[in-house]
Image (cartoon, rainbow, N blue to C red):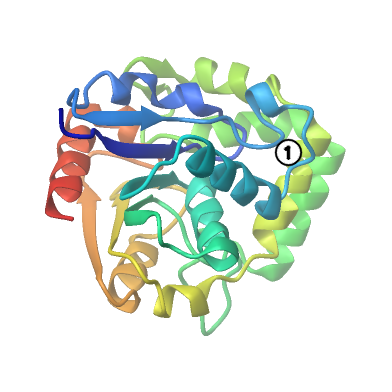
Amino acid sequence: MPRRRPVVLLHGWTMRGSIFDHLVARLPSGFDCHAPDLPGHGAQAMVEPSLYASARTLADLLEAQDLRDVVLVGWSMGAAVVWQYIEQFGADRIAGLMTVDMSPKLGCNADWPHGLIDQGESDLTATTERMISDWRGMTEAIAITMSAQRDGAPGYSRQDALDQILANDPAKMIAMWEALVGMDMRELIGNLPCPLLASCGARSRVYPKSAAEWLAATAPRGRMHVFENSGHSPHLEEPEAFAKTLVEFAVSL
């Protein structure tokens, strides 16, 4: 029997691996799917989160299961985890990477307009301070911006998102947020050793489409896909289209 193609799906900040359950159910039986909880989240809630620890989680999974020729899917923070993994451990086990609505650098400036929408360095500092002083208020904003529609995605409402966000330890979420704010993976993207499919939602309220355009243009083997009816979470907002795009990408590798 031929070996099934391993697919590892890495969730976004404040979420957990089960966010991909509906997507996994739509993927062919020839895919061997894994969706781990990352440090600070879900089953790893007690683990101190960082990009390094998250990359180590991915490395441990690939090694423990002896997964090779892997297709990685990194949604938002999950993409940052993959980039950190490649920087630490290389890409020998990776067949290809699909990123979902993410930028290699969050803060915007005159020379870098592809970070979080309307978030310059001073804005990010203010956002962090608000998280520290009013986490509950910030969770509402996070839940609202996850999808193009304020009420959420089909099968995953804004209330579902809010409940998941509130299930986390705020201190650990803020620590992970600060790690993401401090990240700059632009140099890595220019030398990315595996094929990259940079995807985004055309209606994202988190990152501009130009972030995916930059990734696709900068990676040596980059390409781009836009989910026209989605915001930040196309795997939730357009699950059938997302599954089809992922399968086509995997088959092309």
Asked if 99 appears above or below 132 in the picture, the reply is: below
Is 231 in front, or is 137?
A: 231
What residue sits 41% from the left and 18% below the top?
156
Residue 137 in view in this figure: yes
Which quadrant would residue 151 be assigned to in this image? top left
Q: Position of residue 242 (x, y in %)?
A: 23, 37
In the figure, is residue 78 to the left or right of 163? left
Q: Tag 1: residue type?
A: Met
Q: Nearer the viewer, residue 108 or 86?
A: 86
Instruction: Looking at this view, name the residue that lies furthest to the right.
Output: 133
Query: On the rendered structure, is 114 left or right of 173?
Result: left
- Which quadrant of the view contains residue 105? bottom right
Residue located 17% across and 43% down the image: 245
Q: Residues within 10 Å of mark 1 (few under 14, many from 20)?
A: many
Q: Residue at x 40, y 38 (%)?
A: 8
Where is residue 190 drawn, in percent x and y? Answer: 41, 79
Q: Is residue 187 above or below residue 163?
A: below
Q: Quadrant of the N terminus?
A: top left
